[in-house]
Image (cartoon, rainbow, N blue to C red):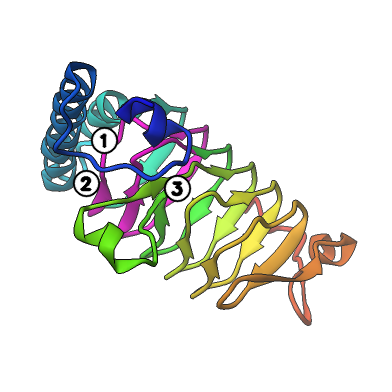
Amino acid sequence: MSLEGKMKSGRLYCEFGHEMEENKAYEKKIEYQRVHCKELVYDYNQTRPSNGKEKRRILDELLAEAGEEIWIESPAFFSYGCNTHIGHHFYSNFNMCVVDDCEVFIGNYVMFGPNVTLTVTGHPVWGEYRRKGAQFSLPIHIGDDVWVGSNTIILPGVTIGSDVVIGAGSVVTHDIPSHSVAFGTPCRVVREITEEDRLSYRKGCPVNEDWDRD
């Protein structure tokens, strides 16, 4: 199987040192993508916060998809950028890190707290494989209306449904179903989201009627 095929199918692969011409050409392609990403990320992080137009221009060039009303606080970091798809009305606080050697899909109305890491890539446990640079990549999917708390890590192959809250400091190793609150290391569902959550924004605190207006 080709290098591209292995990268996109979750198999073990090494990014460098191939003999087949097809794989050599793909090595050059992904090396260009990585360097181009680093240049754009550098520019984004150095752009003044008041220059939203330039920040948006960079995101449009950097990402595979960038929906409406996206704001990513600087600094932020990507491995490729071109493998990340972000929907509408996305907000990320400082120090978002996306290791996107394969595709990452983020839905609409998603919020990240500070220091959130998404990594599609892992390495085998057997040390001899790692000596030769072996790794694998599995896509991450995040649905709509998801809030990911600060210092959360989302690992390769994870799918998070829609209408989900991931508590701060979680390590998400497995899929999380829709309409749930989950937290912990490893992250586990602790309860469903219910009508009570519409009535109270936290335990013992009713939603005030003027929350969205003067």
> Tag 1's secondary structure?
helix
> Tag 2's secondary structure?
loop
Task: Please report whichever mark, 3 or 2, sits nearer to the chain's N-terminal start.
Answer: 2
Marks 2 and 1, Cα distance to the nearest angstrom? Answer: 6 Å
Q: Which residue is mark 1?
A: 52
Three-letter code for the amino acid on which mark 3 is drawn: Tyr
> Tag 3's secondary structure?
strand
Name the spot of residue 139 as percent of width and height, x first: 49, 41
Of the numbered discs in the image, which one, if any, rests on residue 91? Answer: 3
Residue located at (18% from left, 41% from top): 41
Q: Are marks 1 and 3 in contact (CB under 8 Å)?
A: no
Which one is in front, 97 or 147? Answer: 97
Q: Is residue 89 magenta?
A: yes
Residues in magenta? 75-104
Residue located at (20% from left, 22% from top): 20
- Left or right: where 160 falls relative to 121: right
Marks 3 and 2, Cα distance to the nearest angstrom? Answer: 14 Å
Q: Nearer the viewer, mark 1 or mark 3?
A: 3
